[in-house]
């Protein structure tokens, strides 16, 4: 049985996998619930940089899970009928792609693309 710092009390590798895959969505949802920023709010450079570091760390964790040959990507995860590890990873990917697309649209509208961008 594997144990990770963020799921030390989990009783099985399968449950730990589920915890790893959903960590970003659950933790961020819990932290952000009811805390949408005001329309005129601005993040500091330090806050933005921390967000990017957190995103990259979560992405690296998901990549490690998918690359682990001991993981069965098609196994059904506990407490999630019809959800496999592969499906959960795809949901996270789709979610991230949506929001990254929003950033691209904002840059287009704001005219903040670099020189030479078409």
Image: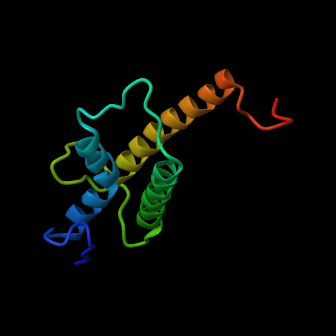
Q: Which quadrant is home to the C terminus?
A: top right
Residue 82 is at least partly visible in this image: no
Vertical comparison of 115 with 76: above or below = above
Q: Residue at x 40, y 50 (%)?
A: 89
44 or 13: nearer the viewer: 44
Q: Residue at x 39, y 51 (%)?
A: 86
Residue 8 is at least partly visible in this image: yes
Vertical comparison of 11 with 15: above or below = below
Query: Could you tell me residue 24's position as x and y percent?
Result: 34, 51
Q: Which quadrant is home to the N terminus?
A: bottom left
User: With 46 as the anchor, is 109 left or right in this view?
Assistant: right
Give the quadrant of residue 7: bottom left
Give the quadrant of residue 73: bottom left
Query: Could you tell me residue 76's position as x and y percent?
Result: 25, 52
Q: Residue at x 26, y 47 (%)?
A: 26
User: With 36 as the anchor, is 100 left or right in this view?
Assistant: right
User: With 4 as the anchor, is 62 left or right in this view?
Assistant: right
Q: How many marks?
A: 0
6 or 38: nearer the viewer: 38
Farthest bottom residue? 1
Q: How is the image coloured?
A: rainbow
Query: Could you tell me residue 15's position as x and y percent?
Result: 20, 62
Q: Residue at x 45, y 50 (%)?
A: 47
Vertical comparison of 67 with 95: above or below = below
Vertical comparison of 114 with 68: above or below = above
């Amino acid at each position: 049985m594997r144990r990770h710092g963020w799921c030390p009390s989990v009783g099985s590798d399968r449950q730990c996998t589920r915890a790893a895959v959903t960590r970003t969505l659950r933790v961020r949802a819990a932290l952000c619930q009811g805390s949408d920023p005001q329309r005129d709010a601005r993040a500091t450079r330090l806050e933005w940089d921390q967000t990017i570091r957190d995103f990259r760390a979560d992405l690296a964790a998901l990549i490690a899970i998918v690359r682990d040959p001991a993981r069965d990507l098609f196994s059904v995860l506990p407490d999630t009928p019809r959800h496999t590890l592969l499906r959960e990873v795809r949901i996270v990917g789709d979610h991230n792609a949506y929001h990254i697309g929003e950033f691209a649209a904002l840059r287009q509208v704001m005219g903040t693309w670099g020189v030479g961008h078409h």
